[in-house]
Image (cartoon, rainbow, N blue to C red):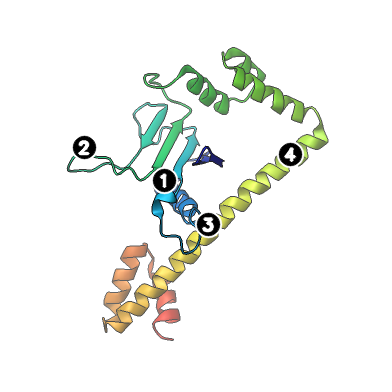
């Protein structure tokens, strides 16, 4: 969503699959690839991007409700890259309230338990407004089912499109690396070891790729 010149992408992750940091990087890359028109060379025209992931678990184990990441220089901590990219991980089960607003905490608790009781217990008019909208949608069984089906279908389509793009990119990377090893006259065993290590492939998979791209 483009808001005031910034692009915001919010995703809800129900389970910790062990890949959220790199998954958020993939989300950012997909958004960045669409921010400039073909042939555009003014990279300063790119929008600032905010990737927001909401999770019912503490990914980093510090008890924080919010973890915000921006690029910093390792050699000089006061130097920021200023590339306009921000990734935020929101933990609905945080324990440390310092540094975050009460409304954000209540909103995260509401994501955890989206009920009338939770909404009424909060002091946020926004949360109560959201719950009222949800209640009005659910009041019609037919509309509610259509809404939920359409929402789930939309989420699945987005996830499938991303996964398909990632799969194609990975396939191309494996093919190019095998072809490069072949051009460099590396022994097949050495090439197999390098490709398998880079892409974390098992013996069965690397044999299949070698048969497809090395022996063609």
Q: Earlier in the sequence, mark 2 or mark 1?
A: 1
Q: What number is the disc on residue 147?
A: 4
- Between 147 and 38, the one nearer to me in the picture: 38
Q: Which label was assigned to residue 77?
A: 2
Q: Is residue 35 rendered to the left or right of residue 62?
A: right
Tell me if residue 12 can be seen. no
**Callout 4: SS:** helix
Q: Residues within 10 Å of mark 1 (few under 14, many from 20)?
A: few
Between the C-alphas of marks 2 and 3, the distance is 35 Å
Determine the CA span between mark 1 and mark 3.
16 Å
Q: Earlier in the sequence, mark 2 or mark 3?
A: 2
* Residue in the image at 51% along x and 19% along y: 103
Pointer 1 residue: 18
Nearer to us in this view, 149 or 127: 127
- Mark with earlier residue (2, 4): 2
Q: Which mark is residue 163?
A: 3
Q: Is disc 1 placed on a helix, strand or loop?
A: loop
| Mark nearer the N terminus (1 vs 3) | 1
**Residue found 53% across the figure and 55% down from its top:** 162
């Amino acid at each position: 969503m483009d808001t005031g010149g910034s692009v915001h992408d919010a995703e809800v992750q129900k389970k910790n699959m062990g890949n959220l940091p790199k998954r958020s990087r993939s989300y950012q890359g997909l958004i960045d690839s669409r921010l400039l028109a073909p042939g555009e060379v003014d990279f300063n025209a790119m929008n600032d991007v905010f990737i927001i992931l909401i999770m019912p678990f503490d990914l980093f184990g510090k008890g924080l409700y919010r973890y915000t990441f921006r690029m910093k220089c390792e050699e000089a901590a006061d130097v920021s890259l200023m590339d306009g990219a921000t990734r935020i991980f929101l933990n609905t089960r945080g324990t440390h309230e310092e540094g975050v607003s009460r409304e954000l905490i209540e909103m995260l608790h509401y994501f955890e338990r989206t009920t009338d009781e939770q909404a009424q217990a909060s002091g946020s008019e926004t949360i109560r407004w959201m719950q009222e909208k949800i209640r009005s949608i659910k009041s019609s069984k037919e509309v509610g089912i259509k809404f939920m089906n359409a929402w789930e279908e939309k989420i699945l389509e987005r996830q499938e499109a991303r996964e398909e793009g990632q799969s194609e990119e990975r396939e191309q990377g494996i093919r190019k690396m095998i072809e490069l090893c072949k051009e460099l006259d590396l022994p097949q065993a050495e090439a197999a070891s390098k490709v398998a290590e880079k892409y974390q492939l098992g013996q069965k998979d690397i044999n299949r790729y070698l048969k497809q791209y090395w022996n063609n």
